[in-house]
Image: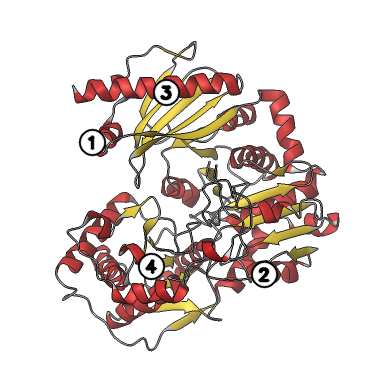
Amino acid sequence: MHERAGTPATESDLIDVEALVRAYYERRPDASVPEQRVAFGTSGHRGSSLTTSFNEHHILATTQAIVDYRTAQGITGPLFIGADTHALSAPAQTTALDVLVANRVRVLTDEFDDYVPTPALSHAILKWNNDPARRAEGEADGIVITPSHNPPQDGGFKYNPPHGGPADSDATKWIADRANELIAGGLAEVRQAEPSGVETYDFRGNYVDDLHHIIDFDAIRQSGIRIGADPLGGASAHYWAAIAERYDLDLTVVNGRVDPTWSFMTLDWDGKIRMDPSSPSAMASVLEHAGDYDIVTGNDADADRHGIVTPDGGLMNPNHYLAVAIEYLFAHRPKWGADAAVGKTLVSSSMIDRVAASLGRRLWEVPVGFKWFVPGLLDGSVGFGGEESAGASFLRFDGTVWTTDKDGILLCLLASEIRAVTGESPSELYRKLVERFGDPAYERTDAAASPAQKAALGRLDGDAITASELAGEPITAKLSHAPGNDAAVGGVKVQTADAWFAARPSGTEDVYKIYAESFKGPEHLRAVQAEAQRIVGDALGAAAG
């Protein structure tokens, strides 16, 4: 923990926006340098112009690659495009429009030149594609320009195909490979033209007007609860006021500032400015309002993540809130299918497993990455899909799809519905879950690993683990594929009756991530974490040998 974590940013912490944007246009990536290549992680290509990892040439090439991918897939409808409030997002959108217009792609940008949250873009794609008349004109897809909660100097570029959610690995690999090929070729095959004839779309109006199909606003309004919403300077900045007006809520936007330096933020755990609504350090200023409202919420820069603050519990751990949301939703959405499953990522809390079992619902456990929930949310076979990193979405009242990408605005509104309908805060409801199912201790830590070790861990098979016990308990499962869809997890998960750990290589650092949880308390968790490093180390050593 950095000594200044949770304290206000100072002048020395802020980026030079002019220098950042200048570097976007001036620096030229070298496709032979790994750090300067286009690389899609679990949620798009990210980098900074200052490290020559997110520059004009990256976006020119990536946009042309997306155009080429659309052609190969037979996607002929409009492309929705939106950007968040990061300083590099607006230049990247201008660059992308140059390429899209030159390639005669029908493009729809925001009608009010506003920022576009990730869930609003997903909603727009699905609204188009679920309308038979519009779909007859061709399937729509989209680009959202955001590095999510990353620091102010970063940029991000995400592609959402016609299913509305994050592109799968096959699509992102194709796009990244093609983009790097175009950069290596000096962008000779990239078409550019001055943007003209670009159409507009009311992302905010369409999204806000449709929310009554998924949130019980009557209950919220009649309860009279007081709501505070902090967009954290992100793309939801103008959405919260629109929601308050449209549904006549006692909702106050506690901080409506948009500033590409994020000078109003408190520093995150590592001393960096990071708009993470699940981090107590980053949310320190929001927590000051905990006693002023019945529910206070926060979102990250593209509003795909949520932070929930209650007067009695402070900032909720994302795993805790997901468990509460799941129990509430499956008890208050009678039109959801009887077989609609509870979706969770492999590294989310096992409290969710216990809640799902008590509801008699099937648990659908998938690898890390929201893209895995897309098919189930589309066909209604998954009622709720959530990640431990505070990202989730769920079905409309009638059991049909809402978004296939994470929706932080939605999950924040749900907290108010829960408070209004039950008369209890999500924190109080989580304490009741603890009384029923136990009190899990959960933590993520990092362990050093060389590139070769990380590669070996990503390929590791559960059968390579020879241990039979974990922190004094018999091991019940050794997983290298997710139980829900049998997809490779890119690491391993080891389980016992009361504890588990999962180990995955980092995509950006020479470490591997260890997620661990124990229902036997913090001391047992420490034992699980220590043995996890030993077990993984032994397996990697055996693989190397």
Mark 2 and mark 4: span between their CA atoms? 35 Å
Query: Mark 1 vs mark 4: which is more N-terminal?
Result: 4
Disc 1 packing (10 Å; few <14; some 14–19; many ≥20) = few
Disc 4 packing (10 Å; few <14; some 14–19; many ≥20) = many
Amino acid type, label 1: Ala
Mark 1 and mark 2: span between their CA atoms? 46 Å
Residue bearing mark 1: 452
Mark 3 and mark 1: span between their CA atoms? 19 Å
Residue bearing mark 2: 256
Q: Residue at x 72, y 70 (%)?
A: 246
- State the image quarter where residue 402 is shown: bottom right
Amino acid type, label 2: Gly
For this view, does 36 lie left or right of residue 212? left
Which mark identifies residue 532? 3
Residue bearing mark 4: 139
Q: Are marks 1 and 4 in contact (CB under 8 Å)?
A: no
Query: Mark 2 vs mark 4: which is more N-terminal?
Result: 4
Q: Residue at x 59, y 60 (%)?
A: 9
Q: Give x and y (percent) for residue 203.
A: 55, 72
Query: Mark 1 vs mark 2: which is more N-terminal?
Result: 2
Q: If the image is split into quadrants, where does the N terminus sit?
A: top right
